[in-house]
Amino acid sequence: MLNVALVMQGLEYLSERWKLLASPAVGDEGRRATMVLLPLLPLLPLLALASPAGAATPVTATACAAGPAGAPQIQVRVHGARSTQGNMTVTLYGSDPARFLASGGKLARQRVPVQPGGKAEACFSVSAPGIYAVAIYHDENNDHDFNLSVIGMPQEGYGFSNDAQGRFGAPSFEAVRFRVEQAGGVVPVLLRY
């Protein structure tokens, strides 16, 4: 993506330097500095492409109620909870597989109540269409932790987008990822205990 503002700033700077060349107040040193910069003029757009300001904007997410109008929304619908105790912790991840289930890797997290019938819903407003993943656990004891037994087996219900399951542990990012378009989407998740 071309950073037009940076290109305009560069052209403005070079224009001012060119005007100074004609001024009798500018000495030989100033003229030499400007003459060195002028051959770089054709490279200015490439410089703008490589700048951090020209980089892609990171994706963000928030609860739908706090999101901007018209932003894509991801409706997560959880079912299969064995009780209404505690809360359902719904975590949204972006498109980077290295950040999936990693500490600090989430885009957003919501803790929502479990409704009668073992259901829960969370809604995320995201800043752009793209690839996302969802991981959920039923925090029955409301300690804000996914509890495991001494041998590492889950003691609370859990689930992932695409109802993906891992063979020995959590499923891969490839198994849980899904695409969200501008219109948003619904992600059903079945809990497993």
Image (spheres, rainbow, N blue to C red):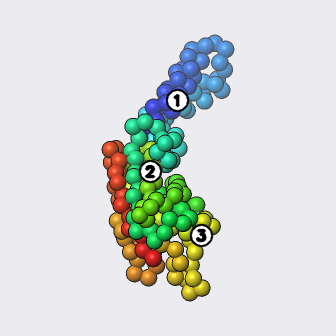
Task: Check disc 1 and give the amino acid type.
Answer: Gly
Q: CA distance from mark 1 to mark 2?
A: 43 Å
Mark 3 or mark 1, whichever is nearer to me? 3
The secondary structure type at the circle numbered 2 is strand
Residue visible at 58% across and 75% down?
A: 147
- Please provide percent x and percent y for residue 94: 45, 56
Q: Is residue 132 left or right of residue 62?
A: left
Residue visible at 56% across and 87% down?
A: 151
- Please provide percent x and percent y for residue 23: 61, 13
- Mark 3 touching mark 2, by CB under 8 A? no
Q: Which residue is mark 3?
A: 141
Q: CA distance from mark 3 to mark 1?
A: 59 Å
- Please provide percent x and percent y for residue 148: 56, 78
Mark 3 or mark 2, whichever is nearer to me? 3
Residue visible at 44% across and 82% down?
A: 168
Mark 1 or mark 2, whichever is nearer to me? 2
Q: Nearer the viewer, residue 11 or 60?
A: 60
Q: Is any part of residue 168 visible from this angle?
A: yes
Q: Is residue 142 left or right of residue 70?
A: right
The secondary structure type at the circle numbered 1 is helix
Task: Check disc 3 and give the amino acid type.
Answer: Asn
Q: Which residue is mark 1?
A: 10
Task: Say which label, 3 or 1, has the lower sequence index.
Answer: 1
Q: Is residue 65 above or below residue 153?
A: above
The numbered dot on residue 123 is 2
Q: Is residue 80 above or below residue 13?
A: below
Q: CA distance from mark 3 to mark 2?
A: 23 Å
Task: Check disc 2 and give the amino acid type.
Answer: Cys
Task: Say which label, 3 or 2, has the lower sequence index.
Answer: 2
Q: Is residue 109 above or below residue 80?
A: above
Q: Nearer the viewer, residue 66 or 174?
A: 66
